[in-house]
Image (tube, rainbow, N blue to C red):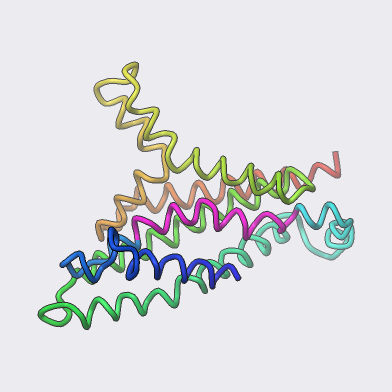
Amino acid sequence: MVIGVFLILMGLVLFVFPDTSLLTGGYATLDTLFGTAPIVFLFLIPAVTMRTLAEEQSSGTIELLVTRPLSDWEIVLGKFLASFLLVVFALIPTFTYYLTVYFLGAPQGNLDSGGIIGSYIGLLFLAGAFVSIGVFASSLTNNQIVSFVLATFLCFFVYLAFDFLSSLPIFYGKMDDLIQSFGIEYHYNSISRGVLDSRDLIYFTSVIILFLAATTLSLGRRKW
């Protein structure tokens, strides 16, 4: 259902809605896909991750899970990889959009393939960051709805809030750029240009590790 909803929604945005349709835009580009997908992920990924640990705690199966010969870190990593792979499987069919634009271009193949590859890599890192946030939110409660709302808020905050904060008049000079660089959107837009900067890769990796470590700490509350 998650994959189906995502593909249907992106298909409508890319080919049906007249304001965003590639067929009426006149340019061979997938900027609409990479501009819309993060907003969809803000709601889609929390829906995927809300059950990962919250349901385990509400049903009592968390006790069975933690008695297995697995460390807390391995349990968290398994939950993260399961949700992340689901998002990856949702992205794989969107390659048909690339083929469509490739063959519809005049001349054929007249599009920035390097930028598109960079945007896909950025989208994968973005998905990884959102999944780690979603799993963390799921570890804080045994209610799936609360987990979804909390994960959506955290993803929205980390993705967009720093950009809004940087525009406040109290930040000036280089301070606004510094505040903006704490947000995911800043680094996602950087990778989407087709340039894989080590600073952007380190940022996404750090966010993922930070929230997975926080999830492991949260899961270990039963030992306190």
Q: Quadrant of residue 107?
A: bottom left
Q: Residue lying furthest top in this view? A: 170
Q: Is residue 215 above or below residue 90?
A: above
Q: Is residue 138 above or below residue 154?
A: below
Does the magenta-highlighted stretch encompass residue 52?
Answer: yes
Q: Is residue 1 above or below residue 139?
A: below
Q: Residue at x 54, y 72 (%)?
A: 4
Q: Residue at x 50, y 66 (%)?
A: 6
Q: As rendered, which of 52 and 37 lies closer to the eye?
A: 37
For residue 86, side relative to residue 162 (left or right):
right
For residue 134, side relative to residue 74 (left or right):
left
Q: Residue lying furthest left in this view? A: 107
| x, y percent for residue 78 | 67, 64
Q: Quadrant of residue 223?
A: top right
Q: As rendered, which of 60 and 195 lies closer to the eye?
A: 60
Which secondary structure class fits the magenta region best? helix
